Image (cartoon, rainbow, N blue to C red):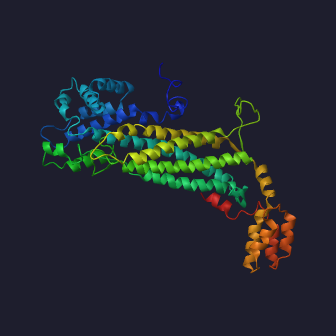
Amino acid sequence: MSLSTITALSPLDGRYAAKLSALRPIMSEYGYMHRRVQVEVAWFIALSDAGFDEFKPLSTGARAYLLGLVKNFSEADCAAIKDIEKTTNHDVKAVEYWIKSKFEARPELEKAAEFVHFACTSEDINNTSHALQIRAGRDQVVLPGLDRIVLKLREMARAFADVPMLSRTHGQTASPTTVGKELANVVVRLQGAVERIAAVKILAKMNGAVGNYNAHLAAWPDFDWEAFSKKVVETHEPMGLGLTLQPYSIQIEPHDYMAELFDAIARSNTILVDLSRDIWGYVSLGYFKQKLKAGEIGSSTMPHKVNPIDFENAEGNLGLANALLRHLAEKLPVSRWQRDLTDSTVLRNIGVALGYTALAHSSLMTGLGKLELNEQALAADLDASWEVLAEPIQTVMRRYGVAGAYEKLKEVTRGQAVTPEALHGLIQGLAIPQADKDRLLAMTPASYTGKAAELARRV
């Protein structure tokens, strides 16, 4: 059976393949191999500039050629490396051999070929490559996805800032809010989550087999290898990697920054789970309608249904993403002694975790774009819930020292239908100033929204 979108084992590369085109070049095996070539080339060029008599600075042409190997890296190049790996049974060594094969008929590079992968352990190449992949996945896919959701929710928050809505705390009618304010709450939460994700420093180490520059110093004992490594890691691309040096490590970079980042992404996903469930509930209550699409079917047997499938899909995929992200965050910082390989296969699933996250972002944007506010349903719900005005009435009573204010309102409102006439009769009999009576008499559930509209417009 050939591999295609209908035979793929993972739905990310099957049913949902088209929605993840932005992530695939970054987090795939191709993306991983591409970054390995980038790291090897950056290290090689930097070595030529280190001042060693044995490796003179490369010519402008040689540099351009090497950087071209990175810039023009193709699927065919990746396949060629995989073919070499069939013999070496070692993926990083296959990259080294592939780069050296590209030196043929180029005497300047052939002469310096042994400086490819010089003094490096495989993990020097792998951890930096993963760091480059993770940075790109975060900056090019995850953060833009969240930014689009924040922008859409902000637009909705401001558009619906003045539309009153009955709150439900513990599933019971509660002090009214506005639709915009409830969406603004999510905007503020997501903004904080985005800031935490963006603030994580992406670290990398290039310090040899167990983090002590052993081989480096064996070759050139008097050279400042730590400063050199820092320069390669932190110099901006393409001459460096544009990452942050991790100065202390065992054979592997400790992966604490990964745990921090994956935890931060998982927290953003949890906020989106909360949003998905709330919108689902508001659709169920009729607060939102969903735009109809010609030919689309909501139920195979119930023609009237338009299911909130986008929010359900988002919730499900966010759960899958978080299961993976939390395992990554818990597992990756743990390594037996100076190295074990349990992280290697796990790291290859970062793209899967980010894939489910990106898929959920896509579903949410689709779902949010289908929503239409049903102001009639919102107004009817409010008009059937006059009991929520017990709160302002008893609060004003307490302001003026009316004894047992809370208890009196509880007797009138708890567990029974409350009419405006009953509340107005209660207000008329209160021993409070007439101006406050008039203010309470003019109040309706729809007007009792506090600063909700102001807060919604502020985001």
Residue at 65% in and 55% down: 182
- Left/right of residue 348 with respect to residue 215 in the rendered view: right
Number of numbered labels in the structure image: 0
Q: Which of 294/71 is in front?
A: 294
Q: Quadrant of the C terminus?
A: bottom right
Q: Quadrant of residue 350?
A: top left
- Left/right of residue 285 with respect to residue 354 in the rendered view: right
Give the answer, above or below, for where 275 lies relative to 83: below
- Left/right of residue 64 with respect to residue 145 in the rendered view: left
Q: Position of residue 130 (x, y in %)?
A: 36, 40
Q: Position of residue 172 (x, y in %)?
A: 72, 57
Q: Which of 365/69 is in front?
A: 365
Q: Position of residue 36 (x, y in %)?
A: 32, 35
Q: Residue lying furthest top in this view?
A: 1
Give the answer, above or below, for where 110 lies relative to 378: above
Q: Which of 162/383 is in front?
A: 383
Give the answer, above or below, for where 394 lies relative to 138: below
Q: Position of residue 64 (x, y in %)?
A: 28, 33
Residue at 20% in and 36% down: 58
Q: Quadrant of residue 161?
A: bottom right
Residue at 22% in and 47% down: 228
Q: Which of 219/349 is in front?
A: 349
Q: Quadrant of residue 418?
A: bottom right
